[in-house]
Amino acid sequence: MKLLKRTWADISMDNLSHNYHLLRSRIPSDCRFLGVVKADAYGHGAVPVSRQLVDLGADYLAVSNMEEAVQLRRSYIRLPILILGYTPAFYAEDMVDMGIRQEVHSLEYARQLSQALAGSGKRLKVHVKLDTGMSRLGFFTDHPESFDQIRTLAGLEGLLPEGIFTHFPVADSLAPEDQAATERQFRAFTAMVAALEGAGLHFKLRHCCNSAATLLHPEYALDMVRPGIATYGISPSEELEGRFDLRPLMSLRTTVSQIRPFRPEVGVSYGWTYHTPAPRTLAVLAIGYADGLSRSLSNRVSFLLRGRRVPVVGRICMDMCMVDVTEVPEAAVGDVVTVFGSDGDQAIPVDDLAKATGTIPYETLCSINKRTPRFYLDGEQRMEVLQYIV
């Protein structure tokens, strides 16, 4: 079957390399780099992105769950993989066999993993999760019993504590109170680690820096950093936009299916939420909410066509949407339209779409679904095509 260029995402591997080296330049030379490739590498394609990170020199990879880890192993990616979410203890031996690391957030969970490995002679490398203020998974650093629980965990059969880590919820904020809160979290983390080391429990890898902390607080880097969204060229928050030379990887593109003139006062698409105010020329695009383009963007955003912005008019449909191309008279069927990303010297940041829907770029990127193939580019040259369906 010939490659169908209906709607697709261009992924710049040059920009991935640029962002990787930028982030590396922020941290000590002996600090390890963990590439966060969960959620299909934030919608960019976990396997191609992971392969590139391996070539660039990343030391570890992180995923959300067992299925994501297995996907990488089946693709012959051999870097150590850390699962950041819960994995049923039933899979403990499989994780050992595949060289996967598992986060451990409670003594009860640690005991379940240990019991699953009892008598096997196998040891699962684990990373102990400390909750210093995220209020999600982890041992509370301000609970006295956590110290003894972690010491008990370290002595359980079948477990090998390799790392210890925490997560910063407000490191991407420049507000003084949030920066102070991040510093308190770091101190709580290092205090617990120091206490455990004083009791003879040493960890090879101490890590707490997400994207924002890697960029703003390299002094918190310790043994490893875990930048996520910044690796993909997106600022961790609006406050940090433009502060660092991050370059987005993804440009989402579609094509023009039909162009037609309309008289005034014609209702467009479901519900007739838009009526042509005057004679207008509208184009139908081959992208809709089934491709991950949120229906809530209807009548609220513009795309790029031949270097000019064309507004979305009417409700976005499952497989199509309409734009007003009156100001682009040379527009033609088959033209490429950029939904977000770069188009020559013009660009529409993914942040624009995220703000229009009241969300963050993370969600917008992860919403670009598997009906949309990914084209991996080295400069202008296509290196690889990832097609999930065909």
Image (cartoon, rainbow, N blue to C red):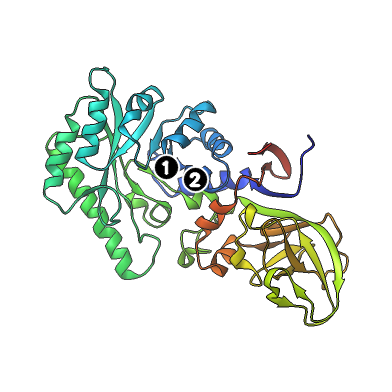
In this rendering, is residue 10 above or below 110? below
Quadrant the C terminus occupies: top right
Any part of residue 45 in sight: yes
Residue drawn at (51%, 64%), measured in percent from left and top?
241
Q: Which mark is drawn over residue 39? A: 2
Residue drawn at (30%, 56%), measured in percent from left and top?
134
In this rendering, is residue 130 above or below 177? above
Any part of residue 59 in sight: no
Q: Which mark is drawn over residue 64? A: 1
126 to the left or right of 251: left
Q: Residue 121 or 342: which is nearer the viewer?
A: 121
**Quarter-of-image position of residue 172:** bottom left
Q: Residue 221 or 13: which is nearer the viewer?
A: 13
- Is the C-beta separation of discs 1 and 2 under 8 Å? yes
Q: Which mark is drawn over residue 369? A: none
Label 2 element class: helix
Q: Amino acid at mark 1?
A: Ser
**How many numbered marks are there?**
2
Query: Which percent across, then down, holds residue 115?
Result: 23, 27
Distance of label 1 from label 2 (alpha carbons): 7 Å
Q: Amino acid at mark 2?
A: Ala
